[in-house]
Amino acid sequence: MTTASAPARYPLTQGVNPWLVTVSVMLPTFMEVLDTAIASVALPYIAGSLSASNSEATWVLTSYLVANAVILPASNWFSRRFGRKRFLLTCVVLFTVASFFCGAAPSLAVILLARILQGAGGGALQPLSQSILLESFPIEKRSMAMAAYGLGIVVAPVLGPTLGGWLTDTWSWRYAFYINIPVGILAVLMISRFVHDPPYIKHAKVGKFDNLGFGLLIVWTGCLQVVLDKGQEDDWFGAVWVRWAVAALVAALALWIWRSWTNPKGLVDLHVLKDRNFRTGCLLITLLGMCIYITISILPLFYQEILGYTAFTAGLVVGPRGIGSFVGSPMVGFLGSRIDNRKLLSLGFLGFAICSFIFGAVDLSIGPFTLLLPITLTGFALSFVFVPLATMTTRTIPNHEMGAATGLFNMLRNIGGSIGIAMATTAIIRRADLHQTDLSRGLPASSALFQQKSSALAAYLGHRLGPAAARPGAFGLLYGKMMQQAAMLAYIDVFRWTAVLALLCAAAAWLFKKPPRRVKPPAGLH
C-alpha cells in the first residue's frame, strides 16, 4: 500500500488501519477493566495484609469505581481542551504510576488514596477509547468493531479473578497491581504511533471549565462513596452522620443536574438524554453495572470464604467465563447487523438471569466443576449484552456529541457497580445474621438431635483434645458449621436477587426504538 493510497482507503483514521487503532485503544481499556476485577479475588489477602476486615477491603473496589466515575463526565472537556490523544496518554501514564503505588501500599489508607488516583487516571480511558473506536469505522461496520472492543471489555473482568488469584497465590496480591505497568507502557507506545485526533478536535473551541458543576459532582459522588463504604458499619440511617451525608448527596445531585441541564457550556451535556435510545441505554448500563459487579465481587468470595478455596483455585473456577466471552463476542459481532439488537440484548440478560438462578441453587457439597457450565454461559450471555447495548445506545448520537454521551454512559455503569457491591456486601452480612437466627431457632440446644450430634463429636474429640476440651470443642464445631450454612444462604439470596434484576433488564431492552430494516448485510461484514 502506498502512502498516497492509505488515506484514501482509511479516511477516518488518517491513513492508519482502523484495526490497529482498535488494538491501541483496547489495551488501556482492557487494563482498566481488568484492574477493576483483578483485585476482587485478592480482597481477603489485602484485608489480612493491611489489618482490615473483609468489608473494609471492599473499599478498594468502591473507592476506585467512584473516583473513576468523577472524571468520566469531565473527559469530554479535557479531550477537547488538551487534545484527545494527549489526554488519553496522560491518563494511561497516571493509571500506570498509580498502579505501582497500589502495589507498594503499606496500609489501607495508602492503598485507598492510590486507588482514588488510579480511578481518576482510569476514568477517561473507556469513553476516550470508545469514542476513538466508533469514529474510526463507518456506521455500517460499527457492530464488528464494537464486538472486538467488547471482547476486551467483557473478557477482562472475567479473566481478572483467575489472573489475580494466580498472582496472589504465587507471589503476592501486590502483583495484581504491578501487572498493569508493562501493559501501560505498551499502550503508551501504540497510542503514540497509531492514534490521531480528528479535525474537529484539533480546531474545537472550548469554553471555560465548569468549576461549579465539577465541584458538585465531587460532592455527591464523594458522599455516595462514604455512605456506601461506611453505612453498613453504623447501621445506615440509624446514624445521624449517614442522614446528613445522604441529604448532602441529594442536594448536590439535584444542583448538579440543574446546573448541567441549564448551562449549555456545562461540564456534562445532559440534553443527550432527550434521545430515547440513549436514555434507555443509560438505565440499562446502570442496572448492568449492578449485576456484573455483584457477580464479579461475590462469586470468588463465595468460593474462598464459604468453601475454603485458595485465591488461585477460586479464580480458576470462575475463569471459564472468559471462554464463553471469547465464543460469544465474534458471534454477536456477526449477528449484530442481521438481527434486531433488542432480541440479542434481551436474550443476553435472560441467559445471565438463568445462570444467576443456578448459582442460587448451590449447597456446601458442590465441587470445582459443579458450576462450570453456568459460569461459562455467564460469559457468553454478557457478550450478548454489552455489544448490542453499546451499539443501540450510541446509534443515534452524532459524532460531535459522542464524547459527552460515552462519558455519561460509562459513569452510570460505575455508579451502578458501586451501589451493587455495597448492596451485596450489606445483604450478605445482614442475611447471614438472619439465617443464623433462624437456624438456631430451628435446632435448639435442648433438642435430641443437637444432643446426639454434640455427644458424638465430643466423643471423637475426647481422644484427641482430652475430656475437658471435648465438649466445648464439639459446640464450637457445630456453631462454625451453622455460621457457614447461614453465610451460604446469604450468598444464595444475593444470587437470586441478581437474577431478578437481570430479568427486569431483559424486559427493559424492548424500550429501545426498533432499528431500521436493512435490505442486505452491510459491505465488509460477510
Image (cartoon, rainbow, N blue to C red):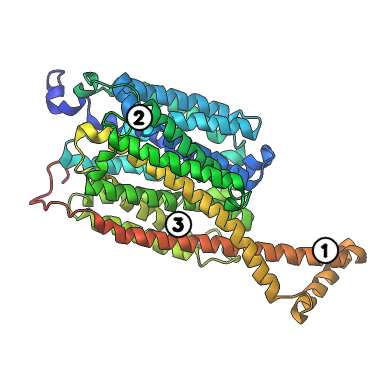
Residue at mark 3: 375
Count of numbered badges drawn on the protein: 3
Residue type of the residue flagged with mark 1 = Gly
Front residue (pair 122, 420): 420
Q: CA distance from mark 3 to mark 2?
A: 34 Å
Above or below, comparing residue 63 to residue 276 in the picture: above
Tell me where residue 353 sits by quadrant: bottom left
Residue at 55% x, 44% y is 244
Mark nearer the viewer, 2 or 1? 2
Residue 75 is labelled as 2
Q: Which residue is mark 1?
A: 473
Measure the C-alpha gap from mark 2 to mark 1: 59 Å
Instruction: Check disc 2 and report its element: helix, strand or loop.
Output: helix
Asked whether, in this view, residue 132 is left or right of residue 360, the answer is left
Three-letter code for the amino acid on which mark 3 is drawn = Ile
Residue type at the position of mark 2: Ser
